[in-house]
Image (cartoon, rainbow, N blue to C red):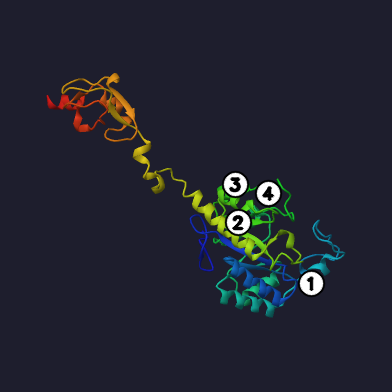
Amino acid sequence: MLTRIGGRPVGPGAPLFTIAEIGLNHGGSRDEAIRLARAAAASGASAIKLQTLRADRLVAQHCPAPAHVQAESLRDFFRQFELSEEAHAAVAAEARALGLVLMSTPFDEGSVDLLERVGVDAYKIASEVMAAVACARDAGASAIAVLHCVSSYPVPSGSENLAAIATLARTLRLPVGLSDHSATPEALVVAMAFGASIYERHLIADEASDAIDAPVSSTPEQLRDAIAAAERARQAIGDGRKRCLPAEAVNLTASRRGLYARRSLFAGECLMATDVIALRPAEGIPASAIDLVLGSRASRPIAAGQALTWDDIVTESQERHAV
């Protein structure tokens, strides 16, 4: 079971593991990729992620462009986002200096070899989920997490399908998260409620950026705010165990009911329903013990309005044992 990535905890109970997706937003520039790595560190992200590709190993010459891309040749389009091994190594060095986990999505076997030489902490595989998990497990992989993603850029309102996060967690029994292409900020907090412990979001340096994925990206400030909101949500969600919390314990006595005498009672009197009332605060005998109190006898005089204690009564069971 995956519990850590690059030394950082991942999963239920841990702070949100946030991946700042540099992706293609570097525009093919090593320096811009490094700049975005620094922006990711400033945002409080846990990791940065690249996309390692070679255009001629990714798409056929005649491959049509997806709906959000305007390009006559998709191969030429992707070629402008290729980063050299030297650029990967420079970004990796910067990530380590900044204390960031380094990840990448390799799109071919040669890219995996490059990333192995550079040294990455984890891989992300863009795939059909069930088949990919089965393939990874068959190959002996156990440190696996799954991210829900809607491959529309940006995701139309109402198409987020965030409940699928809980379905993935329940079905696969793996840490789950969200790869977020939505245009509004609330998706992350909802995802947390469905069990997300990993969050991936494209990053741009500032709102003036014309990067390719800018419409589905966050600035460092926006990502920092999202991470803070996620932590508040994690604290609010809690561990799911229903119990008296410290914050409400101070109100426990005042908000519950105890048993009180409706009238003055003499020693030896039998307590009937008309003699007892349940009132706040829950001093003395709790209201839930009413069946034990009715039919008991007063062991001593009890004033009207007095909270009953176990010392004030002798129950039928106590009388039987005394005989």
The residue under the point 77% across, 69% down is 57
Q: CA distance from mark 4 to mark 2?
A: 16 Å
Residue placed under numbered mark 4 in the picture: 160
Proximity of marks 2 and 3: CB atoms separated by less than 8 Å: no
Secondary structure, mark 4, is loop
Tell me if residue 102 can be seen. Answer: no
Please name whichever residue, 183 or 164, is drawn nearer the observer in this view of the structure: 183
Q: CA distance from mark 4 to mark 3?
A: 14 Å
Tell me if residue 293 can be seen. Answer: yes
| Mark 4 residue type | Glu
Proximity of marks 4 and 2: CB atoms separated by less than 8 Å: no
Q: Residues within 10 Å of mark 3 (few under 14, many from 20)?
A: some
Residue 28, given in percent of the width and then of the height, sits at: 75, 73
Residue 275, given in percent of the width and then of the height, sits at: 27, 21
Q: Residue 85: name its quadrant.
A: bottom right
The disc placed on residue 80 is: 1
Secondary structure, mark 3, is helix
Residue 11, given in percent of the width and then of the height, sits at: 52, 57
The residue under the point 61% across, 53% down is 188
Q: CA distance from mark 2 to mark 3?
A: 11 Å
Which comes before the other along the chain, label 4 or label 3? 4
Of discs 4 and 2, which sits in the foreground? 4
The residue under the point 73% across, 70% down is 53
> Which residue extends farthest left?
323
Proximity of marks 1 and 4: CB atoms separated by less than 8 Å: no
| Mark 2 residue type | Val
Q: Residues within 10 Å of mark 1 (few under 14, many from 20)?
A: some
Which comes before the other along the chain, label 4 or label 2? 2
